[in-house]
Amino acid sequence: MRRTWPDDWESRKRGAGCRLCADFTGHSFHSGRVSEALLERHAIAIGHVAVVFRPRHVATFTELAPDELANFWADIQDVGRTIEHVFKPCHVNYLLLGNIVPHLHVHVVPRYLDDSAPERPLPWNTSPVPEEMFTAQFQQLRNA
Ligand SMILES: [Zn+2]
């Protein structure tokens, strides 16, 4: 087998150098029961948010105790409802990936009637959200 994943993958999964452990606070618009909701600066859609598990480093949801799991998904549901209210998407995708940053987080991605991939996942082509637009979206979410 020719390994394709990075050599440090296993240590990153255990938390080495985890950038989400280092800083949850930068652009959190909502603190949930066990998470912070971060508006993505490199977004695949308007209103793309990451809900990040806060209490400690875990790589994936299979590591959570039952009460942590229930609280985490309740937080994600709250954020999904906020996004539905603020951005009026036609659908919302919930993506649990962790392929780049293996610290438990779920991407909450609003889908719009005019987006580029109806009935399929959006391509992961992130682009930086212009600062003015980012600030406006952040305020909308914070006020919701
Ligand atoms: Zn972490």
Image (cartoon, rainbow, N blue to C red):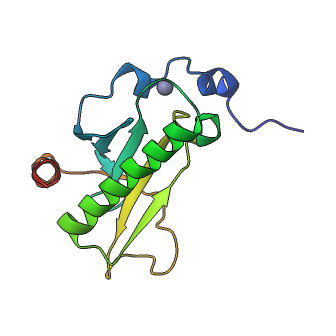
Is residue 45 rendered to the left or right of residue 55? left
List x then y, in percent, for residue 4. Answer: 74, 38
Is residue 108 rendered to the left or right of residue 96? left
List x then y, in percent, for residue 8. Answer: 66, 23
The quadrant holding residue 113 is bottom left
- Is residue 46 at least partly visible in the picture? no
Instruction: In this rendered view, identify the residue nearer to me: 19 or 82.
Output: 82
Q: Residue at x 14, y 47 (%)?
A: 142
Q: How many circles with numbers are drawn on the protein?
A: 0
Tell me the quarter of the image containing the C terminus: bottom left
Tell me the quarter of the image containing the N terminus: top right
- Is residue 63 at least partly visible in the picture? yes
Would you place residue 122 above or below residue 99 in this image?
A: below
Q: Residue at x 9, y 51 (%)?
A: 143
Q: Residue furthest right?
A: 1
Would you place residue 46 above or below residue 35 in this image?
A: below
Instruction: In this rendered view, identify the residue nearer to me: 74 or 140.
Output: 74
Q: Residue at x 31, y 43 (%)?
A: 37
Is residue 19 rendered to the left or right of residue 99? left
List x then y, in percent, for residue 57. Answer: 51, 25
Q: Residue furthest front?
A: 67
Would you place residue 24 above or below residue 120 in this image?
A: above
List x then y, in percent, for residue 85. Answer: 21, 67
The quadrant holding residue 30 is top left
